[in-house]
Amino acid sequence: MSLFKQLLIAIFLFMLIIFSGSFMVNLDSSRDQYTNQLLSHAQDAATALGLSLTPHVDDPAMIELMVSSIFDSGYYNSIRIVDQSSGKSLFERSAPTSIPDVPHWFISLVDVKPQAGEATIMRGWQQAARVEVVSNPVFAIKRLWDSTLANLLWMLACSAVCILAGAMLLRRQLRPLNYMVKQSQAITRREYLTQLDLPKTPELRRVVEAMNLMVTKLKSLFEDQAEHSERLHNEAYLDSQTGIANRRAFDMQMQSRLSDEETAPGYLLLLRIQDLSGLNQRFGGPHTDNLLKHVADMMSVVKSQHAKADSILARIRGGEFALLCPGVTHGEMVNLQHSLTQQLSAFYATGMSDIDPVAHTGMVPFNSGDTPQSLLVQADRVLVENETRTTHQTNDLPVPDSAATEDQHLWFTRLDNALSNVQFQLFFQPVVDCKNPKNIIHYKVLSRMLDEEGNSITAGRFLPWIHRFGWGHRLDQVMLGLTLKQLKSYSGHLALSLSGSSLTNETTIKQLLSPLKHHPQLASRLILELDENQMPKPELMEVFVKMLNQHRCGLGLQHFGSRFDMIGHFSQWGLAYLKIDSSYIRHIDIENDKRLFIDVLHSATHNIDLPLIAERVETAGELRVLQEVGIYGAMGQLLGEPAPF
């Protein structure tokens, strides 16, 4: 029983004891008082009647008249005139003892007995008769009953007021304790709440201050670990001069993308600044560093305008930059290259370089399964060819493969029909416990589209077109409906990835999550995942997290590895887990820098009890290292291929 209920019951019992004690004391004193009054009343009536009957002792009619007059004017059980010599009753009036509107148990409880009085009727100097008067206690008992009811009502009213006032006071006084419960629950969700409104009660104030201190300490510890992780990540995988990814990070990401069959076809672009060493000699090191920084910033802006969010920009050496763009068409890449050309011309016009063109570019298409080395060699060959020309031109690309240049109208019709008729198939890849791979944590839901012949098309082929047509929200709605349907026949947990386009505003979020209202039990076994590169704005993220908590639906973050600035928000979002990008998992048993990074990340997230899951584990050596580090879960070809149930 809660403390609040115990205190309310204590107040009620206290008031009940007060009422009972007051009733017993009042009853005892009132009973004595009424007994004395009844005795006096009976004796007075007997005395008055004896004196009145003395002149008429031998007149039976007058005796009857006077006795009836007295009997009818008061509360008497009986009045009897008894002959003194013979003991016979000369006249008697009596009435049954009945007390209306008073329960019998109360009459027995108060136990007010009738009282008798006597007087002598004289005939001269002789005692002729005797008057016996017995009073009726009905009046006394009725008064006691009325006063008891009045006291009871008054005590009940006082009790109700005290209980209500006590309840309000207790709620106010116990509010800090309730908030402390929320703080404790929030810590389990990796959230850190501080109670600013300190109670005035000294004992509660000390407890709240101690709880706030503990929460602040935990939050500070997590933030320190997060900053340490971000600093190590930046030192290992960011270029110190430009602030973009370095060659090490680019090689990791490119290897991961090309080895993933879900990666959409795209293009690799190389940009090389002309005569970087000469510029350094003519203008000095600071000027050259400034040029490199401006080129990196310019390429970041162009990348955000013309490429997808998961594109990779890096400085791979000296004045050479690389841009890997999955899921872009030939026309989009040409526009990106032209935009770079215009921006580079502005650098020459402003005097940042005395060479025109400032840099040359070269690009080649790629598909999943290509080797990084061969792709870089092809791009470098195209770049060298462009550098031999007298003016900056876009290179003549080889004819791209059909996956990247299929007719837009065909894909529009195919996808619109598939989304309208729900022509998608669910594949499920197991996510297992690292320490016990036989224990399945949940299944990751993957989508396959069925074409006109009923053949499955991988997400890597149709997702770029989905995003190009702006149908990410439609696909998420279809996939969410299919996943909820699957949960009806599967008792475990399922994880489904969402597109960032479904979280552009509060209306689209409500529309997307509306099916969860009708399936609360299924929603509690569903985990929605977001890509770190497709996170909405902080205010929309708060709305999204709040709605998920209302439906008791989990939230996970996948492909994590570059947005370390978000670590500080993890404690507020209450993530179910964090999936580490496969580029940090591949060859982790060979490359020690990756293991160091995973160690630091695990240490930071362990402080907030945030589980880590490794993506695309493909060798026993990688799994062994993950087990040694203490990673919670893993998924990949080694542990289970995607397949339908």
Image: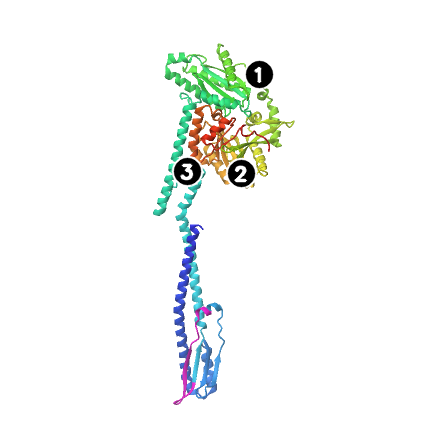
- Provide the residue designation for mark 1: 399
Q: Amino acid at mark 3?
A: Tyr
Which image quarter is the C terminus in?
Answer: top right
State which tag comes first along the sequence, 2 or 3.
3
In this view of the protein, which residue sits in the foreground, 503 or 440?
440
Q: Amino acid at mark 2?
A: Arg
Q: Which residues are magenta?
A: 107-129
**Dot 1: few (<14), some (14–19), or many (≥20) neighbours within 10 Å?**
few
Relative to 207, say whether 620 is above or below: above
- Label tally: 3
- Provide the residue designation for mark 3: 192
Q: Quadrant of residue 194?
A: top left
Q: Are marks 2 and 3 in contact (CB under 8 Å)?
A: no
- Provide the residue designation for mark 2: 525
Distance Cα–Cα, label 1 vs label 2: 47 Å
State which tag comes first along the sequence, 1 or 2.
1
